[in-house]
Image (tube, rainbow, N blue to C red):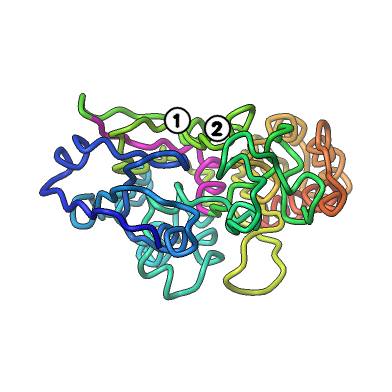
Amino acid sequence: MHPFILERPRDINAAVALGAQSGRNDAPVEYIAGGTDMVQLLQENVRRPDRLVSLAGLLDNRIEAGPQGLRLGAAATMAEVAAHPGVIEHFPVVSESLLNSASPQVRNQATMGGNLLQRTRCPYFRDVGYAACNKRAPDSGCAAMDGENRWHAVLGTSENCIAVHPSDLAVALVALDASIEIQDAGGEHSVPLADLHRLPGNTPHIETILQAGEVITAITVPASPAARRSHYLKVRDRASFEFAVVSAAVVLDMDGDRIRQARIALGGVAPKPWRVPDVEAALAGVSLDPAELRPAAARVAEGAQGRGHNDFKIELMQRAIVLAVETAGARA
C-alpha cells in the first residue's frame, strides 16, 4: 500500500477547505467515509493518494422518509436505510436496491455518499497488472475492448472505456428523480443525481462532476405517490455479494390497469445509471400484458453496442424491463 497522510478535520468546513476530490484517479487528496471501497483500492494499489481526508463523524446520518419525500444523510448506512419503515413503505425500490447489494457486513458500514461514488468493478481497472486502462492511467488504452468484456457496458460507451457503474442504489435513485446536496467553500447547492456521473468520452478517468473541495452531504427524493409502486430487479451471477449483470429500477404511475407514466433506469449496462426516456414514452397507455410491454422495452436496444462477450446484455436488458414493470405494476 502506498503511504499516505490521514487528515481528521474537526468539522465539514475544515474538510472542504482541504480540497480533496472524489471520482478521479489522479487526485492527490481524496475523501474517505465508510471506506468499504476505498480500502480495497488502497490495498490493491489502484489508488495512491498522498492524503486521505476522513469524513467520519462530520456528515448527517439522519433518514427522513414518508409521503412528504425522502432525505438521506450522506453518512446513513446502507443497512439503516434498507431497514427504515418509511423507506420500505413509500420507496420500496430504494430498500430493494440496497438489500440486493454487497453483504450484510458491508451494508452495516458503507454510507449513502460512498455508495454513489464507488468505483467500477472492471477487472482491468482493479488489477494494476494490466497496464492498459484509461480510467486508471489516462491514454494507456482499454484492455476490455478486445478482452474479457462480459460485465461491460453496451450503452453510453466511448472508444476509450466500456466500464460500467457499479451502484445499485444510484440506479434506483435516478428512477426516482433524486438530487444530491453538495457542500463546498461557498455553501450548499443541489444537483440532479442523473447529472453526477459523467460519460467516459475522452476522459474516462474523470467519473463525476465533483470538483476539489466538494462533498455530498445528503440525497433528496421528491414526494411521489407512484414511488410506492416501484421495484428493483437485479440479474446477477450468484444470489449474494455480486454486482449486476443487468438491473432495472421501475417507478409506475397507473391509471387503472394501464400505465400513465413510467420512470425507468438501468444498471450494469452503462458507465452511469442509464435512464431510458424512449422506453418510458412508449409505455404510456400500455397495459401490463407482456405482449404490449415487449415492443416498448425493445426501444432500449437502439444504439446499443456489444463487444462480443457482452452481446447478450442487449436482449437481457429488454427482458429485465418487462419483468420489472410487471412486478411493479402488480403492487397495490
Q: Is residue 71 above or below residue 2?
A: above
Return the x and y of residue 242 as percentages of the image width and height. Answer: 62, 67
- In the structure shown, which secondary structural element does the residue marked by tag 1 occupy? loop
Q: Is residue 32 above or below residue 219?
A: below
Q: Amino acid at mark 1?
A: Ile
Q: Nearer the viewer, residue 14 or 294?
A: 14
Residue that badge 1 annotates: 209
Q: Residue furthest top?
A: 186
Residue at image location 37% in from the left, 30% down from the top:
211
| Quadrant location, the C terminus | bottom right
Q: Which residues are magenta?
A: 169-184
Residue at image location 64% in from the left, 45% down from the top:
133
Quarter holding residue 30: top left
Q: Is residue 332 visible?
A: no
| Callouts 1 and 2 close, C-beta under 8 Å | yes
Residue that badge 2 annotates: 198
Q: In this image, 89 relative to 323: left or right?
A: left
Q: Nearer the viewer, residue 209 or 313?
A: 209
| Quadrant location, the N terminus | bottom left
- Within 10 Å of disc 2 (Cα), the crowding (few <14, some 14-19, many 20+) is some
- In the structure shown, which secondary structural element does the residue marked by tag 2 occupy? loop
